[in-house]
């Protein structure tokens, strides 16, 4: 029983970290109408920052990595938003950002040496807490708490605030927003800035759990895309459940059915596509 709880908690931690990345990807596509595939590279960048500044687990280094990560992610997201505006076609955007991501990953790999690196948890969170008689890392519980607060903050910002109303309006009909004398482009730039900052910050927070390693960027990007496809590109609530499911599949299924985990993820993706198609058909019948 205790072992199942520990694995489930790991899944929640991974799922909430992926939720931060997938939310940025979802906002970029749903609001800014930019299909940018550098989120895996940005996540890896955050993990590398944590390793460079806080590999030994100091609070000063960890806070520095977070602050630099926020600034770096926001700058990268905003800069990509400006550049990709010149490429209105989603296929062109995808190809361009894949290229940018590969360059960034190559530079980062040169920096950390193309081998898995570990990042220690900061003092006070480097111990463990007994859960049903089993020791569980305190840092992972802290990540669950912080990521959950971030998820709530994102939901309130997008779904329950006046700026969120504008964000949803731009996602639904940017031309209508223009007739109100407002600038959709400004909202879209802000969303791209937030999107980049979320991905890098998630990488910094997750580094003591998933440190810099070859292939981390592609894994995070692939899982985030599955989450967005399954949950939709314009819904904070719709993204959360698939993120938690993917987190559980990455941990529980990897332990219980290691050879079946990829097929279960593919099943989640297909289920999301089928559900969305069914909802669209029902909506078409109603109208």
Image (spheres, grey):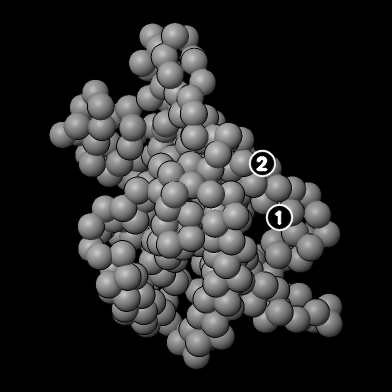
Foreground: 186 or 135? 135
Between 227 and 267, the residue placed more toward the observer is: 227
Q: Residue at x 80, y 79 (%)?
A: 182
207 lies left or right of 266 = right
Please indicate, yes or no, whether residue 144 appears anywhere in the rendered image.
Answer: no
Residue drawn at x 54%, y 35% is 125
Residue named by callout 1: 158
Q: Are marks 2 and 1 in contact (CB under 8 Å)?
A: no
Looking at the rendered image, the disc whose residue lies closer to the viewer, 2 or 1, is: 2
Quarter in which the N terminus is drawn: top left
Q: Is residue 14 visible?
A: yes
- Give the left or right position of residue 204, taking residue 256 as reference: right
Residue at position x 35%, y 40% in the image = 268
CA neighbours of label 1 inside 10 A, class few (<14), some (14 to 19), many (20+): some
Secondary structure of the residue carrying tag 2 is helix
Crowding near the residue tagged with mark 2, few <14, some 14–19, many ≥20 C-alpha atoms within 10 Å: few
The answer to which image quadrant residue 144 occupies is top right
Q: Residue at x 75, y 81 (%)?
A: 183
Residue 204 % position (x, y): 50, 55
User: Height in image: 124 above or below 182?
Assistant: above
Residue on which the image places disc 2: 149
Q: Position of residue 11 (x, y in %)?
A: 42, 32
Mark 2 and mark 1: span between their CA atoms?
A: 14 Å
Q: Choose between 63 and 29: the one closer to the eye.
A: 63
The x and y percentages for residue 224 are 41, 53
153 up-or-down from 99: above or below: above
């Amino acid at each position: 029983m205790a072992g199942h709880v520990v694995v489930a908690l790991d899944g929640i931690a991974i799922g909430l970290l992926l939720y931060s990345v997938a939310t940025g990807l979802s906002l970029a596509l749903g609001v800014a109408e930019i299909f940018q595939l550098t989120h895996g590279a940005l996540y890896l960048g955050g993990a590398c920052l944590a390793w460079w500044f806080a590999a030994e687990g100091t609070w000063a280094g960890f806070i520095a990595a977070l602050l630099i990560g926020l600034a770096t992610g926001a700058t990268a997201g905003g800069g990509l938003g400006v550049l990709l505006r010149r490429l209105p076609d989603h296929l062109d955007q995808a190809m361009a950002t894949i290229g940018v991501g590969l360059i960034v990953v190559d530079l980062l790999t040169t920096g950390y040496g193309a081998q898995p690196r570990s990042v220690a948890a900061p003092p006070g969170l480097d111990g463990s807490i007994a859960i049903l008689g089993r020791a569980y890392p305190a840092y992972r519980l802290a990540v669950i708490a912080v990521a959950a607060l971030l998820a709530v903050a994102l939901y309130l910002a997008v779904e329950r605030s006046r700026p969120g109303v504008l964000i949803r309006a731009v996602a639904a009909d940017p031309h209508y927003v223009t007739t109100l004398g407002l600038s959709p482009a400004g909202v879209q730039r802000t969303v791209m800035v937030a999107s980049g900052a979320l991905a890098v910050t998630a990488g910094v927070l997750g580094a003591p759990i998933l440190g810099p390693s070859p292939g981390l960027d592609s894994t995070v990007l692939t899982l985030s895309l599955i989450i967005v496809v399954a949950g939709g590109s314009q819904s904070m609530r719709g993204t959360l459940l698939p993120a938690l499911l993917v987190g559980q599949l990455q941990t529980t299924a990897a332990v219980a059915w290691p050879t079946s985990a990829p097929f279960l993820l593919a099943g989640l993706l297909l289920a999301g596509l089928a559900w969305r198609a069914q909802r669209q058909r029902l909506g078409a019948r109603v109208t």
